[in-house]
Amino acid sequence: MNKPILLSTPHMSYRELEFVKEAFATNWIAPVGPHVDAFENEFCLLTGAAHAAAVSSGTAAIHLALRLLGVESGSEVFCSTLTFAATANPIVYQGAKPVFIDSDYKSWNMNPDLLREALAARARIGKLPKAVILVHLYGQSADIEPILAACNEYDIPLIEDAAESLGATYKGQSPGTFGRIGIYSFNGNKIITTSGGGMLVSDNPELVAKARFLATQARDNAPHYQHSEIGFNYRLSNVLAGIGRGQLQVLSERVAARRHNFEVYQQALDNLPGVEFMPEADFGTCTRWLTCLTVDPEAFGADREQIRLTLATQQIEARPVWKPLHLQPVFAECECFGGAVASDLFARGLCLPSGSNLTHEELERVIEAIFTVYNNRNN
């Protein structure tokens, strides 16, 4: 029986354990502690962010961002449609309503022209959104400058969901550091992990200080437990922050490994009829957090779902590209500007195993399995 090849698994180095041992030795186990402070500072040095607050998940960071920007019941928030549900769920937590914006084929991320059209349409009826959430998908930055310019024209704050793109660049700068607030995820499948965790960043120190306050149950400065507003249990633990510190030290190695995976796949599969890889936009560097491709079933002889199911029979995990949020039952009543591009990418898109700890033999197994599908359908 072949060993399973999973999509994207945690990849530990020896460094994380030393920080965890230190947390145990000093009994800094609960949330807050020296590793949390150090993790925030080291994250800022790595990304160029001015200020950071370590929290329990990327979802928590988005929720805090929306709360900080005054999103409330009756508000609308514009949001990328081609993304995981965790991007939009916090909008609903706040009683607000998501409005989705389609992708472009250049980066698979939010289409800047569509965003500008949507904002102009809302401005004409006096119903501008309270914020825009821009997702940087699969390790690739969106085209930030025109999106930020459109937001600034209407004085709409931009939240960057950079959960999938730590280590990427946009014109030499880290995505997540351009908008009013940026968020990152350290979930177990991300390019670096704390098992579960996230980060909120901003150039505004007051916003980050308020995020920390809200993330620790909004406890007032008093000798007793006093609360003047509703808070959350969203702060990252000192133990997990220690893991994060070790992971930060090997980020560049993890990016290089995932880009190598992509290069191996591309060299082997690029000439197969009907196969096209997610492009790398000319404005930045993609980490290839996941290697993604699209399949034209007429040219290839099988669709992406037939390929996925065949890989599964060989203990190889592959997944469809994110199902657009405007197609999700839970968001069925939400408006979407465009939608055809994201729908097409979902229909034809497949994510291949992409972990930074994949071996050459495992990559070859994936490639051979895809060739088997092609040969069986065309011979």
Image (cartoon, rainbow, N blue to C red):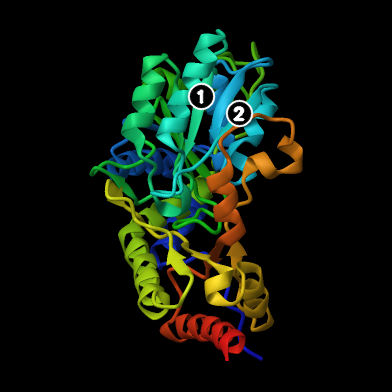
Q: Along the line of sight, which residue is nearer the eye, 239 or 361?
A: 361
Discs 2, 1 touching: Cβ within 8 Å: yes
Identify the mark nearer the N-term, 2 or 1.
Answer: 2
At x 53%, y 47%, the residue is 341
Identity, as a three-letter code, of the amino acid under mark 2: Val
Residue 292 seen in this snapshot: yes
At x 56%, y 24%, the residue is 66
> Residue 128 at x, y = what percent?
53, 14
At x 41%, y 57%, the residue is 247
The residue wearing badge 2 is 99
The answer to whether residue 14 is left or right of residue 63 is: left
- Neighbor class of circle 1 (other Cα within 10 Å; few <14, some 14-19, many 20+) is many
Measured in 3D between alpha carbons, the distance from the residue under mark 2 to the one under mark 1, in whole angstroms, is 9 Å
Identity, as a three-letter code, of the amino acid under mark 1: Ala
Residue 300 quadrant? bottom right
Q: Eyeballing the image, is 61 above or below 248?
A: above
> Residue 304 at x, y = what percent?
60, 68
Q: Eyeballing the image, is 351 above or below 69?
A: below
The residue wearing badge 1 is 118
At x 39%, y 80%, the residue is 268
Any mark on residue 22, and which? none
